[in-house]
Amino acid sequence: MPTLDKGAERAILEACASLESWSVQKLDTLVRHASTLGKEQGALAEMESLYTEMGLKPFRVPTVPEKLANHPGFSPPLISYEGRDNVAAVHTPKSKKGRSLVLQGHVDVVPEGAADIWVTPPYEPSIRDGRMYGRGAGDMKAGIIAYCTAFEAFRRAGLAPAAEVQMHSVIEEECTGNGALATMLALPKTDAVIIPEPGPGIEGIYTAEVGVIWAWVTVTGRPAHVRDMQAGVNAIEAANAIAAKFKLYEAEMNRAERIHPAFFGVNHPVNVNFGTIEGGEWNSSVATRARIGMRVGVMVGYPVQQAKADIERLVAEASQDERLRGAKVSLEFKGFMADACVFDQDAEIVKLSRKNYADIAGTGLRDYPASGLTDGRFFTLYQDTPVAVFGPDAQDIHGIDENVGLDSMHRITRTIALTMAQWCGVEKL
Ligand SMILES: [Zn+2]
């Protein structure tokens, strides 16, 4: 492993310590942007001004579906990309000595859910017992701030990475990954990638992640007045019958012999989630139409296209079920069409990150085989670039009262700073 001048190392770590309240302030600002799907503009502009403050010249990277459509990592979009361009910034050293690096984070967050049951409003960050509460605080705005603070610490120490460092702030990690894909393809390939996605209540490093498909099933029944209920086909009941078939599929896909070794010991890694349901017209009318939006997990080693074919077969079979009595069923794929992947734990960027974290925290990063996904798959599967996905301890991500440990964020900041220094080398400003 590369050796780093001890003086430079100390100066960078001291700068990280002096930036702790700066980083909490930046996180607070970023969490205030309710950057759900289609509303990422404020958070993207915030990243633009942060990169500028860090002495960089940010630029926009559009997501153009027509250009990505034939890429195996592309997912069918849910909405237009107009006005939601990703933000990137590139540090170019005076002389290239070390290895190049991408620091990547997604600015989009999932919807806050029932805001009335949050202890404090989801987009008004609140710090309690050393943790910041807010939608996106953990997933993954703390990670974004950690890598920005790490880079800023170099500057405050009068130093800079001695290799190209790209920073990607992308959209749609939570529904397609197309923002990450577009940004990766728009910029030169680097020697490694760090993505500070959070661990579930732990400081963890992702060893593998499942694939995910989003599917939408629409059932059109036959309307009738409830007094003639037998004459109609209730679309809501029919949709429930189809949903039950997906639960059987889920159980089948979690059978021990189907589980990849990377997920041994993980309870129920392949999940089918019914996330949205809409339908019906009136409490006293047999429902004409119902639509279920679902998320289907895919095990490592099982190609996403095969899982897609499974879903098509399941829906075709379900529509022949006699309980559906001729209801029309249609299936649509919009959102994730994402393959699973394993992150190479022998990659030097991973080993270096683990070693630096252990030196800083006095304990190792925990292995985390994830039953959700990250943008890390693009670099691993389609670019063969080693990726270290590790980040702060966050709780209740995608849930109510999402929060992140601030000391944990600071430890991850120092880990990224040291790893960047050793990976890229350092030069004087
Ligand atoms: Zn995330």
Image (tube, grey):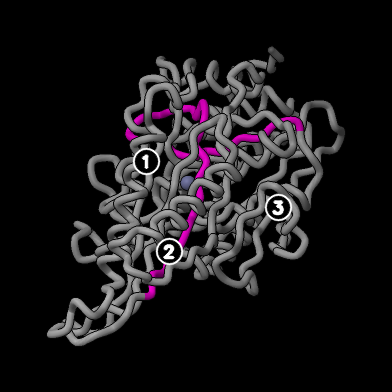
Seen in the picture, residue 327 relative to 152 is either above or below; the reply is: below
Measuring 40% from the left and 16% from the top, which residue is drawn there? 363
Q: Is residue 210 left or right of residue 348?
A: left
**Tag 3 and tag 2, C-beta contact below 8 Å:** no
Start-end of magenta stretch:
191-220
Q: Is mark 3 within 8 Å of ligand 1?
A: no
Q: Earlier in the sequence, mark 1 or mark 3?
A: 3
Q: Quadrant of residue 264?
A: top left
Measuring 52% from the left and 41% from the top, which residue is drawn there? 211
Question: How far across and down, in percent of the image, does residue 31 sit?
Answer: 42, 57
Q: Earlier in the sequence, mark 3 or mark 2?
A: 3
Q: Quadrant of residue 380?
A: top right
Q: CA distance from mark 1 to mark 2?
A: 16 Å
Identify the amino acid type marked 3: Thr
Q: CA distance from mark 3 to mark 2?
A: 31 Å
Seen in the picture, residue 329 relative to 151 is either above or below; the reply is: below
Name the front one of labels 3 and 2.
2
Question: How far across and down, in percent of the image, does residue 401 sit?
Answer: 26, 52
Identify the amino acid type marked 2: Val
Judged from the image, the secondary structure of the residue bearing numbered disc 3 is: helix
Q: Quadrant of the N terminus?
A: top right
Q: Quadrant of residue 368?
A: top left
Q: Mark 2, residues whose alpha carbon is within 10 Å: few (<14), some, or many (≥20)?
A: some
Q: Which mark is residue 183?
A: 3
From the viewer's side, name the closer residue of 364 and 270.
Answer: 270
Q: Which mark is residue 250?
A: 1
Let me know if residue 192 is in the magenta part.
Answer: yes
Name the front one of labels 1 and 3.
1
Question: How far across and down, in percent of the image, does residue 122 sit?
Answer: 31, 60
Q: Which mark is residue 217?
A: 2
Let me know if residue 197 is in the magenta part.
Answer: yes
